[in-house]
């Protein structure tokens, strides 16, 4: 059986037997990989801590029939400790890796891997609010998967914007001529924030007020769960309070 190595982000782990784990990873070159890490739950394990969620590692695998086996693991970036020390960051990261897990049922490309690594790095460093980082990650990950939302031109007719009607099922903002009755209307500030999160305009995103952030988070959550066609269990536990407290402290 062949041996291969790749850079990986650990998405989740499951116990197997008394001392082993099944580790699910998003890799740089091989998409999503599920592999057995033998003995990692023992105190003397050489690489148990390197295969925890949110860690980035250089991993060597022994290819098996159904599950590969981890034979070596070297830490590339240790984001786990900093992320788990902050509840808002931890809940945001949990939603990120669950999303990556669902999006990579088929083989994922390098952009999804790099996006996830960058988002986890940003969380660990506290570069932006955890909620903003999560919302930006979700929008960009969905865009890479082929579900890019429109926040300016009509998602149905292409009519130039701006438009205020937002319909999740139609792919973003739509013109009044195609907006169903009772369609949600978004204000200019919220649409501007959503656009900034999608494009990575952090100066504009960080300057957004709490009301716009809350509305944008609701839109992103609905859009994500609609296109994934199933709920994200971790999304309901995301802590938005730290974002609110920081905003109140500034105002």
Image (tube, helix red, strand yellow):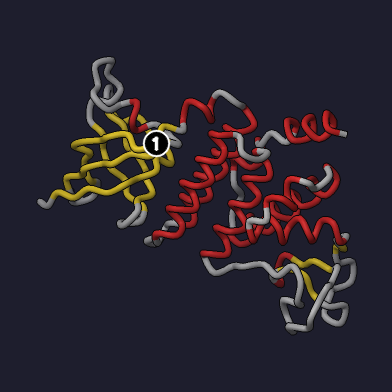
In the image, 125: left or right of 222? left
Residue carrying label 1: 77
Q: Residue at x 59, y 54 (%)?
A: 230
> Considering only vertical position in the picture, is 23 above or below 101?
above
Residue 228, quarter of picture: bottom right
- The residue at the far top in this view is 43
Furthest residue to the front? 203
**In the rendered view, would you say 154 is above or below 109?**
below
- Is 121 on the left or on the right of 163, as rendered? left
Q: Secondary structure at mark 1?
A: strand
Q: Is residue 78 above or below residue 211?
A: above
- Look at 24% across and 46% down and name the residue there: 67
Quarter of the image that includes the C terminus: top right
| Rendering quarter of residue 54 | top left
Q: Is residue 155 left or right of residue 127?
A: right
Mark 1 crowd level (few <14, some 14–19, many ≥20, 10 Å Cα): some
Query: Vertical placement of 244 versus 154: above or below?
Result: above
x, y (%) of residue 175?
A: 83, 78
Most foreground residue, 145 or 181 = 145
Q: Residue at x 53, y 50 (%)?
A: 99
- Tell me if 14 is positioned left or right of 80 in this view: left
């Amino acid at each position: 059986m062949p041996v291969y190595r790749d850079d990986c982000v650990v998405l989740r782990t499951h116990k197997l037997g008394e001392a082993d784990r099944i580790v699910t990873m998003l890799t740089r070159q091989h998409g999503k990989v599920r592999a057995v890490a033998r003995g990692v739950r023992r105190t003397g394990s050489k690489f148990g801590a390197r295969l925890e969620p949110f860690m980035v590692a250089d991993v060597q695998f022994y290819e098996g029939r159904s599950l590969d086996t981890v034979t070596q693991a070297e830490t590339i970036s240790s984001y786990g400790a900093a992320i788990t020390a902050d509840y808002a960051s931890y809940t945001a990261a949990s939603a990120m890796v669950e999303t990556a897990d669902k999006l990579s049922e088929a083989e994922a490309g390098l952009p999804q891997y790099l996006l996830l690594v960058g988002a986890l790095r940003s969380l660990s460093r506290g570069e932006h609010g955890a909620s903003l980082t999560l919302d930006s990650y979700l929008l960009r990950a969905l865009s890479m998967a082929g579900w890019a939302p429109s926040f300016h031109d009509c998602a149905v007719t292409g009519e130039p914007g701006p438009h205020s009607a937002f319909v999740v099922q139609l792919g973003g903002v739509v013109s009044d001529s195609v907006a169903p009755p009772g369609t949600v209307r978004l204000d200019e500030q919220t649409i501007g924030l959503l656009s900034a999160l999608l494009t990575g305009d952090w100066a504009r995103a960080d300057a957004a007020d709490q009301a716009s952030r809350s509305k944008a988070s609701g839109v992103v959550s609905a859009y994500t769960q609609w296109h994934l066609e199933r709920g994200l269990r971790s999304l309901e536990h995301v802590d938005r309070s730290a974002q609110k407290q920081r905003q109140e402290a500034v105002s």
